[in-house]
Image (cartoon, rainbow, N blue to C red):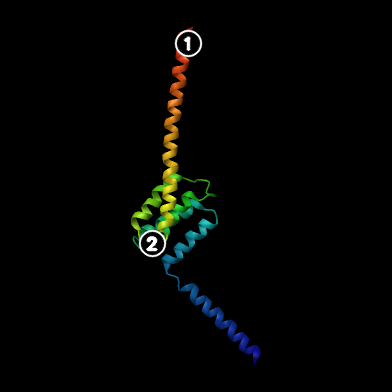
């Protein structure tokens, strides 16, 4: 009797587990697959999958998840195609489209850090150009002395 009860309990558990797995909507399954691509290191494919979700579900919770994931994937440390400029734009889009999302503060922090990095890079480039110009002027000055 105990063995029969154990077998029935295991079968019931398996049936319930399978029912939970199939309770996922098609869009949730697509998000799950996109997340799986990200975890597998297939970052470009993950971004493409997230973008497809955005197109199919504008304004939805799934779209918010996809938008955040796109931004995060662009800045993810292990992504060989890391792109801070794209990440900054995607985080800004997330902040604009989903101002009440629970990840708003996190996205805002990412955006501010990336914006600072972008601005600093621009300032550094401008300083580099000025230094090059000063070097050229110094060389011309030295040549004119001789």
* Helix, strand or loop at mark 1: helix
Residue 24 seen in render: yes
Assign the N terminus to one quadrant of the image.
bottom right
Residue 48 seen in the current view: no
Circles 2 and 1, Cβ within 8 Å, touching? The answer is no
Residue 37 image label: none
In the rendering, at what x and y percent does residue 142 appear? 48, 12
The residue lying furthest to the top in this view is 146
Give the residue at mark 1: 143
Work out whether 21 lies above or below 71: below
In which quadrant of the rendered view does residue 10 lie?
A: bottom right
State the mark number for residue 101: 2
Q: In front here: 12 or 127?
A: 127
Q: Position of residue 141 (x, y in %)?
A: 45, 13
Q: Is residue 2 above or below residue 59?
A: below
Q: Position of residue 26 (x, y in %)?
A: 42, 67
Q: Residues within 10 Å of mark 1 (few under 14, many from 20)?
A: few
Which residue is found at the position 36% from the left and 52% from the top? 93
- The first of marks 2 and 1 along the sequence is 2
Image: 141 above or below 16? above
Calculate the distance from the C-alpha at mark 2 to the C-alpha at mark 1: 63 Å
């Amino acid at each position: 009797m105990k063995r029969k009860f154990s077998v029935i309990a295991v079968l019931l558990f398996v049936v319930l587990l399978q029912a939970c797995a199939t309770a996922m909507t098609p869009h949730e399954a697509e998000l799950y697959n996109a997340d799986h691509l990200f975890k597998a290191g297939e970052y470009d494919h993950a971004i493409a999958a997230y973008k497809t979700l955005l197109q199919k579900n504008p304004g939805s919770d799934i779209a918010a998840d996809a938008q955040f994931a796109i931004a995060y994937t662009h800045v993810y440390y292990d992504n060989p195609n890391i792109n801070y400029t794209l990440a900054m734009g995607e985080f800004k889009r997330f902040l604009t489209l989903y101002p009440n999302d629970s990840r708003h503060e996190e996205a805002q922090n990412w955006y501010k850090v990336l914006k600072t990095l972008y601005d600093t890079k621009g300032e550094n480039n401008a300083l580099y150009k000025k230094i090059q110009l000063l070097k050229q002027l110094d060389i011309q000055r030295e040549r004119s002395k001789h």
